[in-house]
Amino acid sequence: MTLALDTAAQDLLFREARTANTFTEDPVSDEQVQAIYDLVKYAPTAFNQSPLRIVLVRSPEARERLVRHMAEGNRPKTATAPLVAVLAADHEFHEELPRLFPKFPQAKDVFFGERPAREKAGSFNAALQVGYFIIGVRAAGLAAGPMTGFDAAGIDKEFFPEGDHSVLAVVNIGRPGVDAWQERSPRLAYEEVVTTV
Amino acid sequence: MTLALDTAAQDLLFREARTANTFTEDPVSDEQVQAIYDLVKYAPTAFNQSPLRIVLVRSPEARERLVRHMAEGNRPKTATAPLVAVLAADHEFHEELPRLFPKFPQAKDVFFGERPAREKAGSFNAALQVGYFIIGVRAAGLAAGPMTGFDAAGIDKEFFPEGDHSVLAVVNIGRPGVDAWQERSPRLAYEEVVTTV
């Protein structure tokens, strides 16, 4: 056993988990999303900056506003998933830094006083958190359907009109439905990805 | 039980896992890194583009070349960790797409024919994979020490002189040593991160 994680957990999170394209009608509750958040919030970001923000699209009216910014091929599943989450980087995350990183509260101004530096760090660290969130959805026994095919400027304007967030991914969440996925595509071999110097 | 993942796995990957700043001398083997890769390679990226590349810094000479590009506060731990991995986005990932995404091999040219589009997608999707990799290190029972405090241009020039990769993170890997971490910093409350529309 090279891994410490038990086989059932390996399967749940990675080996048997798949990106779902169809879902059953089983609802996804706020309690489930809270359990996911309360698990993945511990995963690391630089300076604990935690820039990810999540919008749960629950009303039919908001769902419609979202669907029209999705790429055509993503619209049917975004329209029918039990829950859709818009994941975005908050470019004003630094306002919370004195509380989030009490060891060096000056980081707020020293490293993140300028918006371009914040956008760069925030986009990367929020992307890490998108990865953690996808794993968290699977940890809840649910399937995630992460998508990046959308009009990002349209979603930002629609859901974050103040201009301080950038959408990174839209994630369909639920239990896999009929023909939820096709055959898994091949992965790169270890030797293609990992080199040693 | 709102989560399907067992409590021991929750603790191993999230609740008790911490970013380590010191390490024991126990080595990290290639077999361990391969087991980590063979687990996290299944996590999703857009079009299965899998742009993350990993350089294991094993020789003393390469370690020295890396350490001098790290921020001063990161140098001692980068110099002493049993294994250091440089994680980078490969901006020429599209070359592998016909094999990685056989459902639509034309994606290589249709979506990723232009370098700026590739850099944008590759940086985001490789960042997701950095998140998966950190979880994978923990799944191996090891502590990860991810860092973004470095001269990125310097590392790119030093380790990827062909100009087709961008470093995203440097990760120290090993078993936690003496005083490996300070008290955990607070996380944002659910209500601060998640809104419903």
Image (cartoon, coloured by chain):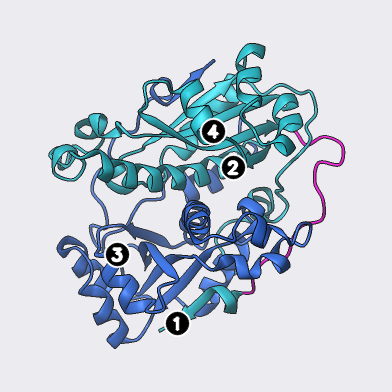
Chain colours: A blue, B cyan
Q: Nearer the viewer, mark 4 or mark 2?
A: 2
Residues at discs 3 and 1 both on one chain: no
Residues at discs 4 and 1 both on one chain: yes
Which residue is the site of mark 2? B148
Q: Work out whether residue B183 or residue A163 is closer to the camera in this orientation and state it.
A: A163
Q: Residues within 10 Å of mark 2 (few under 14, many from 20)?
A: many
* Rendered image quadrant of residue B175: top right
Which portion, as a residue range, is magenta? Answer: B175-189
Residue A8 lies in the magenta stretch: no
Q: Nearer the viewer, mark 4 or mark 3?
A: 3
Amino acid type, callout 4: Ile
Image height check: is A83 above or below B147?
below
Which residue is the site of mark 1? B196
Answer with mark 4 or mark 2, whichever residue precedes in sequence.
4
Amino acid type, callout 3: Ala
Q: CA distance from mark 1 to mark 2?
A: 32 Å
Is residue A81 shown to the viewer in this render? no
At numbered mark 4, what does the secondary structure look like: helix, strand or loop? helix
Amino acid type, callout 1: Thr
- The residue at 63%/49% (across/down) is B13
Q: CA distance from mark 4 to mark 1?
A: 36 Å
